[in-house]
Amino acid sequence: MMNTLIGDLPAEVILFSLFALLLTGVIITIMLVKEQKKTIKSVILLSAIFFHAFNFYIIYDLLTPSPQVSSGNGNPNIPYIFVSFLLFLSFCIVLTRKMSDTLRQKRGWLILIIMVIASTISYFSFVYQLDFISTIKEELYYPLGSWWSWWESIHLNSLYFNPYTFLMGMSISVLVAGVFAVIKKRQV
């Protein structure tokens, strides 16, 4: 759907737009790290979650052509994907820190419930990610080879950036935050 909307734009406009999106992500991440009032911090956190969900969608939908479509040589989206990965990783680290601080102020049973929910989401995201990989391999007849060479093909960008990896990253961050909160609560 989005491919038809932007398909006629010049490559320079598309490239500029993509990197402007990444710059927005960098700014949101920096704002998230800075200390803010509680309401502003919540708005920035929600903005960061929305940004990363949208960025995952961009990579999943726009930057991953189907294997039946010829894409030329290599994967020209590697710089965008690499920066997106670093941004998401930094967001997960900041989310872990912020959630740990928040959970430390909560009761132990609530932390446990949140950790169980995060573990469940992580588990199902992992299972669905493996199923997604299997689908690409078997239904699309696309040879995957080794895990380390998948990044070379533009047809496989969605293996890294999809709803399952997004949820997995966020839920693992919350799970680790819960562990840190429990450890810090016991030290006090």
Image (spheres, rainbow, N blue to C red):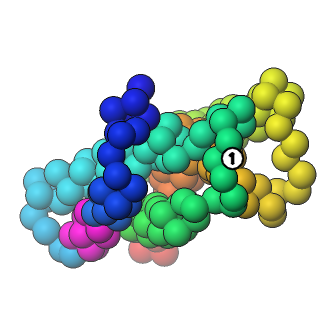
Q: Residue at x 82, y 57 (%)?
A: 147
The quadrant in which residue 137 appears is: top right
Residue 56 in the image: state x and y as whole percent.
47, 46
Q: Residue at x 54, y 52 (%)?
A: 169
* Residue in the foreground of this view, choosing between 82 and 181: 82
Instruction: State which quarter of the image contains the C terminus.
Output: bottom left
Q: What range of the chain is rendered magenta?
A: 23-33
* Residue in the foreground of this view, choosing between 111 and 68: 68
Q: Compared to 26, does 1 lie above or below? A: above
Is 144 placed left or right of 185 in the picture? right
* Residue in the foreground of this view, choosing between 121 and 156: 156
Q: Where is mark 1, residue-wise? A: 156
Instruction: State which quarter of the image contains the N terminus.
Output: top left
Badge 1 local density, few (<14 within 10 Å), some, or many (20+)? Answer: many
Q: Label 1 amino acid?
A: Leu
The quadrant in which residue 122 appears is: top right
Magenta residue check for 32: yes
Q: Residue at x 24, y 51 (%)?
A: 47
Q: Residue at x 51, y 57 (%)?
A: 173
Residue 181 in the image: state x and y as whole percent.
46, 63
